[in-house]
Image: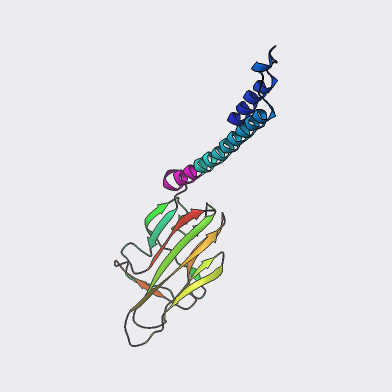
Amino acid sequence: MKSTMLLVLAFSCCVCEPESAGNGDQLTGNGDLVALVLKVTNMADKIALLEAKLLNAEKEIKELRNITTGGPRVAFSATLSDSERGDTGPFTAAVPLQYRKVFANAGNCYNRATGIFTAQVRGMYYFRYSMFANLGKPNSVVSLRKNGERLNSVWDTSTTDGNDNGSNAVVIDLEVGDSVYVELQAGRKVYDDAMHYNTFSGFLLFTM
């Protein structure tokens, strides 16, 4: 923009320059004046285009810098217990599973005391969880919930095939303050030991 103003100013000085005494020092005619005006206008348009491209490039560089270095970093992964062996449940009501052994918790959005992830950054997130069912009844049923709303589930039916496990995942957008957790359904149980079959993980894909 500053370059364009300088060109216009320079052109104005050329046009407004006092006439000399002789006609030979003046412009040869209107054709020369029109050509000069077109040339200055063309240069101004090119400079404006270059300035727009420069601003766009600076914006893209800033976005890339935020992604690689300056953006928020949110990621966690946890399992039910450190080394305890046995069942969790059954309970008379559905409860959030408390994944007490935390492998990672960048951003400190996961609360090991409650088993609940609370978003501190608005964005798109990925979550995954796994479930392990041991022999016997009752069978295992867990669900992933966002603010109390069921997103998906993993269900095991007790048969004669022995131990079973399963997993599920989802990509969802979260607002600041939204909560996500894995819920053990009423009257159900899951089994875990030092092998860490039951896990809950998630991370921020990008901000919005």
Give residue 57's position: percent from left, percent from top: 50, 42
When asked about the image quadrant of residue 174, the answer is: bottom right
Give residue 71's position: percent from left, percent from top: 47, 46
The residue lying furthest to the bottom in this view is 160
Residue at position x 33%, y 62% from top? 82
57 in relation to 27, above or below: below
- Residue 135 included in the magenta stretch of the image: no
Residue at position x 38%, y 75% from top? 166
The residue lying furthest to the top in this view is 21
- Residue 62 included in the magenta stretch of the image: yes
* Figure quadrant of the N terminus: top right
Give 53 or 139, whichever is nearer the viewer. Answer: 53
Residue extent of the magenta highlight: 60-73
Give 104 or 99, whichever is nearer the viewer. Answer: 104
Give 45 or 156, whichever is nearer the viewer. Answer: 45
Give residue 198's position: percent from left, percent from top: 37, 68
Residue at position x 52%, y 70% from top? 151
Residue 162 is left or right of residue 19, and the answer is left
